[in-house]
Image: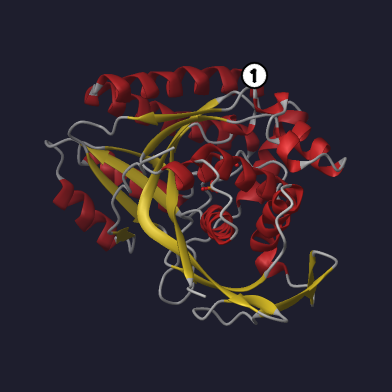
Amino acid sequence: SATIVARAPGKLFVAGEYAVVTPGEPAVLVAVDRFLTVSLTETTGAGGIHSPESARPSLRWTRDAGGLVVAPEDHSYDYVLSALTVIERLRAERGIAPRLYDLTIDSGLDDASGRKFGLGSSAAVTVATIRAIDRFYRLALDRRTLYQLALLATIRIAPSASGGDLAASTFGGWIGYRSPDREMLRRLLDAGDAVASVLESDAWEHLEIVRLRPPRDLGFFVGWTGEPASTVRLVDAVGRGAAVGAVDHAGFLRDSRACVTDLWAALDAGDDAATLDALRRARGLLQALGAQAGLAIETPRLAALCDAAETAGAAAKSSGAGGGDCGIVLAPASADVRGMLDAWEAQDIRRLTIAVHPPEGGD
Ligand code: PMV
């Protein structure tokens, strides 16, 4: 049978990081034109996962009583396997017979030597796997359902993850996002509720995914610090800071909500000046959060990246959890982009030549 090739784009956070982990708090994200591809070929007898690009061993599986039996334990494929677990459960609920397949994963989200840029490879592999299986079994799921399944798969591995990256990877373009109640979703999944009923539960009440207009006339630049960041470590540390009162969490949520709401509105209104202003405020909020938590959310290299952009007349901030990875820049036509890029080069900050991946059509 023919090979199915499904892909999903990477993403960057624009604003609302950390706050968005709380259900209902807003964030803005953007999908980028680097992709992770999952190719699926039907097999008989056994199947598995392969990553030709990496040194990781491939993983093999067989089927037993309708489930995938995977050996040996290998955590490199946690997100793929979780995606398969969730969507295969839905497949079984629909009375569709299981079949076996080989998956080949090809990530365009890392550099040539396999170092991660922090463009959301876990989200992209989850979304691309769900897409591939949706097509394989002809489930004909709509875009929102694909996102929902990707979120259910993700929270089995990373319970605190907001899923904003999944929304950007599923929908493309500029996205406004508020997360659902993932604690409730996990409880429902763990209790063995049918996936079809979990998809309809009240836990999704706060979910919002809105396609935003791109800035009217702002250049989009991404710098890479080369520092690998750990989102889970940083999110946990901020949580501990809030628990011991070092972080004014309520104040942070309030300020972030105001800033992101302004950004959201500025994008919708095509008001580039207000967009730049909101991005600068978002930088300040993350700097203050890091200071309260005693954490380098904005590392010295991220600070250098952002300072060079601001000196050039642009706006910039760390993207995502920070602690390294990428910074994003929005630059008005008046900005000295050449000067910014020269300053980056002098400090060994690499420009990633990536652009926004436009919104994907259909529902
Ligand atoms: O570091 P990234 O790109 O995975 O982004 C993390 C953003 C947080 O808000 C800190 C966590 C989350 O799950 O949204």
> What's the coloring here?
secondary structure
**Which is more toward the observer, 199 or 319?**
199
Is 48 drawn above or below residue 242 in the view shown? Answer: below
Q: Is residue 319 visible?
A: no
**Label total for image:** 1
Q: Residue at x 18, y 35 (%)?
A: 332
Q: Please, which residue is most extreme toward the right here?
A: 191
Is 339 drawn above or below residue 111 in the view shown? Answer: above
Whether the residue carrying mark 1 lies under 8 Å from ligand 1 is answered with no
Q: Is residue 334 visible?
A: yes
Q: Residue at x 20, y 57 (%)?
A: 342
Q: Residue at x 57, y 82 (%)?
A: 55
Structural crowding at the residue carrying mark 1, measured as other residues with C-alpha within 10 Å and reported as few (<14), some (14–19) or many (≥20) = few
Position of 58 with respect to 286 (left or right) is right
Position of 173 with respect to 25 (left or right) is left
Residue 110, position in %: x, y? 45, 67
Q: What residue type is disc 1 on?
A: Ala
Residue 82, position in %: x, y? 70, 57
Is 246 drawn above or below residue 85 in the view shown? Answer: above
Q: On the image, numbered disc 1 is attached to which residue?
A: 250
Q: Secondary structure at mark 1?
A: helix
Is 53 drawn above or below residue 285 in the view shown? Answer: below
Q: Residue at x 42, y 34 (%)?
A: 175
| Residue 361 figure quarter | top left
Residue 336, position in %: x, y? 14, 44
Residue 308, position in %: x, y? 28, 46
Figure quadrant of the C terminus: top left
Ligand 1 located in image quadrant: top right
**Which is more toward the observer, 12 or 327?**
12
